[in-house]
Image (cartoon, rainbow, N blue to C red):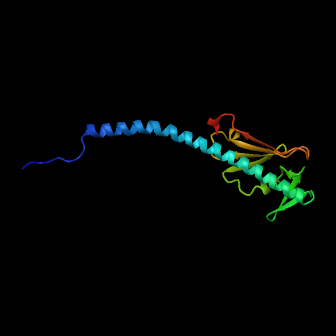
């Protein structure tokens, strides 16, 4: 009687594991790079949303004969120099969705920081209403070092 062994030898298993480790060493850094790029794209998208929300609020403010507050989809938005104010009833009310970001109001500005970023201070958007009616609001992307975002 002859016995036929089936299965893998230890050398074959070691070679397969070595190949898989080599592939993983290339894939993991690539994945973390994609993760950073995703966060940067998310704050760029939020910046565009803020710009659009403030422009729409400004247009409604002009069409409504420049009141102190406007009604945006049933929400009262406080205006300052023709654009949403940086207070709780200003831009945070005019911006319908900021999921994935935490908002804070500091020194007359609304700061949206990306949740889950290694350094949220380096992965944020800052909105400041204009000082006069002749200028638009200031919207600043804060990404000095992409590795922090």
> Which residue ends up furthest to the bottom in the rendered image?
74
Q: Which of 8 and 135 is in front in this view?
A: 135
* 57 up-or-down from 149: above or below: below
Horizontal relation, residue 80 to residue 149: left or right: right
Dividing the picture into quadrants, the one containing residue 60 is bottom right
57 on left or right of 39: right
Q: Identify the residue at the far top of this view.
A: 145
- Farthest residue, direction left: 1
- Which quarter of the image is occupied by the C terminus? top right
- At 14% from the left and 48% from the top, the residue drawn is 4
Q: Which one is in front, 80 or 55? A: 55
Q: Is residue 28 above or below residue 74?
A: above
Who's the residue at 46% across and 36% down the image? 26
**Spot occupied by residue 5 in the image (x, y as percentages of width and height):** 17, 47
Q: How many circles with numbers are drawn on the protein?
A: 0
| Residue 89 in view here | no
x, y percentage for residue 131?
90, 43
The image quadrant that residue 107 belongs to is top right
- Is residue 20 visible from the viewing direction of this image? yes
Residue 138 screen position, x and y as percent: 81, 43
Q: Residue at x 88, y 57 (%)?
A: 61
């Amino acid at each position: 009687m002859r016995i036929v062994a089936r299965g893998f030898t230890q050398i074959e298993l070691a070679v397969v594991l070595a190949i898989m480790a080599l592939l993983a060493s290339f894939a993991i850094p690539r994945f973390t790079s994609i993760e950073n790029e995703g966060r940067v794209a998310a704050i760029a998208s939020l910046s565009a949303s803020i710009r659009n929300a403030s422009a729409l609020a400004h247009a409604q403010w002009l069409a409504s004969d420049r009141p102190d507050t406007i009604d945006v989809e049933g929400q009262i938005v406080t205006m300052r120099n023709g654009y949403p104010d940086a207070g709780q009833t200003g831009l945070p009310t005019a911006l319908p969705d900021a999921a994935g970001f935490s908002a804070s109001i500091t020194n007359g500005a609304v700061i949206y920081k990306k949740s889950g970023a290694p350094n949220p201070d380096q992965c944020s958007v800052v909105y400041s209403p204009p000082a006069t009616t002749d200028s638009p609001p200031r919207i600043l992307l804060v990404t000095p070092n992409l590795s922090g975002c």
